[in-house]
Image (spheres, rainbow, N blue to C red):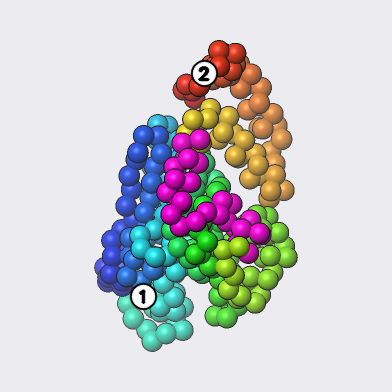
Amino acid sequence: MDTKTREPGMAPLYEVHGACAWITLRRPAVLNRLQASDVSDLRELFARIDEDRSVRALVITGEGRAFSSGYDLDDLGERSGALPPGQLAGKAPPDFSAMTVELEQLRVPTICRLNGSVYGGATDLALSCDFRVGTTACEMFMPASRLGLHYYTQGLIRWSSRLGINAAKKLFLTGATIKADEMARIGFITDLVAPDELDAAVTRLADTLCAQAPRALEGMKRALNEIARGELDEKASDARHVASLGSRDLREGMAAWHEKRKPVFTGE
C-alpha cells in the first residue's frame, strides 16, 4: 500500500449498533473522495461482516455534505501515466470492481445512507447496496465518458440490471447531472425523504431488516441478485426454500403470527 498521504481525512469508521453495522467514509474536506487505501479497507470490512453472524444489516454513509465524490482521479491518472509520473506510475489501481461485487454479494442486506450528493465511482458503490435512502438535496453524475474512461464491466451490468438500459445509457453516455427526483424516478434512490427525516428513515429500515429471519433474508437476497443478472442457480434457491421449511425460524415465525407477537429469530 502506498505510504504517501494523498488526501486529508481518516480511514472508514466501522461501528456496530445492536445487529446493524455502520461504515462511515471520513474525508469530508474532499467530499469523501475514495483513495486506494479506502478500497482495501472497505473490502476487509465487508469480509469481516460476512463472517460475523451477529451482524444482520449494514449501513454505509459519509461525513459532511456529500456521500462521496468518487475515486481519486489524480491517483488513477498517475497510475495510468495520464498525469506526470510519481511513485504510483505504472502501478495497477486497486480493484474497485471487485470491491463493489463483494458489497453487492454481501451476506446481509445493505443500506446506503446518502447524506448528500454522490459522484463518479461512488455512484456504483451506492448502487451496490440493496437500498439507497437519500434526501431531496441529492444529485449525481457519472463522468466516465467525459474522461475517456470505459467503465468496468461489472458496473455496467449492475447499472443496466438495477436502473434499466435507458437510464444507464443516459447517465453513462452523456455524463448528465440529475437531481433527487430523477434519481428516485429511475430507482437510484429507493427511499426519498426530506433532509431532516434521513436519520429516522434509515433507522426504521435498518430496524426492519434486522428483525427479519436472517437465513431467509440472505437466501432471497442472493436469489434476487442472481435473477436480476440472469444468473439464477435455481437448484440452490430451491434447496434453501426446502431447508427453510424445517427451520426453527419458520416455527418461531408461525408461532409469533398466531400469538400476535413479534418473532425472535436466531438464524436456525
Q: Quadrant of residue 32?
A: bottom left
Q: Which of labels 2 and 1 is toward the front?
A: 2
Q: Residues within 10 Å of mark 2 (few under 14, many from 20)?
A: few
Q: Please report the residue visible at 71 percent of the width from the left and 59 percent of the height from the top.
A: 164
Residue 95 x, y percent position in the rendering: 47, 61
Q: Please report the residue visible at 60 percent of the width from the left and 39 percent of the height from the top.
A: 221
Q: Quadrant of residue 6?
A: bottom left
The residue segment tinted magenta is: 182-208
Left-right relation of 220 to 230:
left
Residue 13 x, y percent position in the rendering: 32, 52
Q: Which residue is mark 1?
A: 88
Under mark 2, the amino acid is Arg
Mark 2 vs 1, N-terminal side? 1
Under mark 1, the amino acid is Leu
Q: Is residue 103 visible?
A: no
Residue 249 x, y percent position in the rendering: 54, 20
Left-right relation of 93 to 149:
left
Residue 119 x, y percent position in the rendering: 50, 68
Q: Residues within 10 Å of mark 1 (few under 14, many from 20)?
A: some
Q: Which residue is mark 2?
A: 261
Q: Nearer the viewer, residue 59 or 201?
A: 201
Question: Element at badge 1?
Answer: loop
Q: Nearer the viewer, residue 198 or 119?
A: 198
Q: Is residue 223 above or below residue 255?
A: below
Left-right relation of 77 to 243:
left
